[in-house]
Image (cartoon, rainbow, N blue to C red):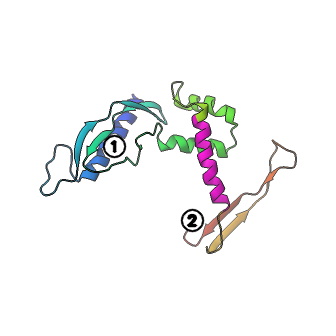
Amino acid sequence: MCRAKVAELVQSYLEAEVDELLGRLRYERRDGKRIGFRDGHDPERTITASIGPIAIRRPRVRGVAHESALIPKYRRRLPSIDKTIHQLWIEGLAHRDFEPTLRGLLGAEAPLSASTIARVNAEFGAEYDTWKTRRLDGNRYVYLWVDGIHLGAGPADEGRVPIIDVNSAGG
């Protein structure tokens, strides 16, 4: 029942995106120039949500370019799944433990292969590398907190230095 409601909510969001793009509701006529029109739905497909696999039908639009902000055309997961994978990666979950952990959270039928998890982690790793090597000059920092952590696992002399900052814009 919950899975059906989540699928219904995602489907409603996809329909609302098209309504906003076209500037009118489904079956509503608009005076003046038409900006594209609805063209049915794509075939039903399964995507992975935080509650498990759900079935959706993406609305099609003709006459104007459209890409869903929630689920781009070939996307197989909701963004919340990638965020969960990123969080598990940050928490230090071993690569071999991702699949069983996510299957426990999302259900046994969740389509998450080891290669999918590795690809998401690689994307996040590249984003993280860019973030951690960014230049800090040019920003005004109100607060900077630095601490050292010695990790019990891994090489004996391995440590980490987390840094938390608050800039003048509040970020």
**Looking at the picture, which amino acid does disc 1 mark?**
Leu
Q: Amino acid at mark 2?
A: Gly
Q: Give neighbour class at mark 1: few <14, some 14-19, many 20+ (Cα, 10 Å).
A: some
Instruction: Pinpoint residue 167: horizontal percent, then vertical percent.
Output: 60, 70
**What residue is at 13 percent from the left and 49 percent from the top?**
29
Check whether the beta carbons of the residues at disc 2 and disc 1 lie within 8 A of each other.
no
Q: Residue at x 50, y 43 (%)?
A: 80
Q: Position of residue 48 (x, y in %)?
A: 47, 34
Quarter residue 131 falls in:
bottom right
Residue that badge 2 annotates: 171
Between the C-alphas of marks 2 and 1, the distance is 31 Å
For residue 14, the mark is: 1
Q: Which residues are magenta?
A: 116-133
Label disc, if present, on residue 4 of the rendered structure:
none
Which element carries disc 2, helix, strand or loop?
loop
Kindly state the secondary structure of the residue where label 1 is placed: helix
Which residue of the protein is positioned furthest toward the top in this rendering?
108
Where residue 114 appears, x then y in whole percent? 61, 32
Q: Is residue 47 above or below residue 66?
A: above
Q: Residues within 10 Å of mark 2 (few under 14, many from 20)?
A: few
Q: Tag 1 or tag 2, which sits nearer the N-term? A: 1
* Predominant secondary structure, magenta span: helix
The residue lying furthest to the front in this view is 63
Q: Nearer the viewer, mark 2 or mark 1?
A: 1
What residue is at 85 percent from the left and 44 percent from the top?
155
Q: Position of residue 115 (x, y in %)?
A: 60, 34
Q: Where is 1 relative to 136, above or below? A: above
Q: Is residue 122 magenta?
A: yes
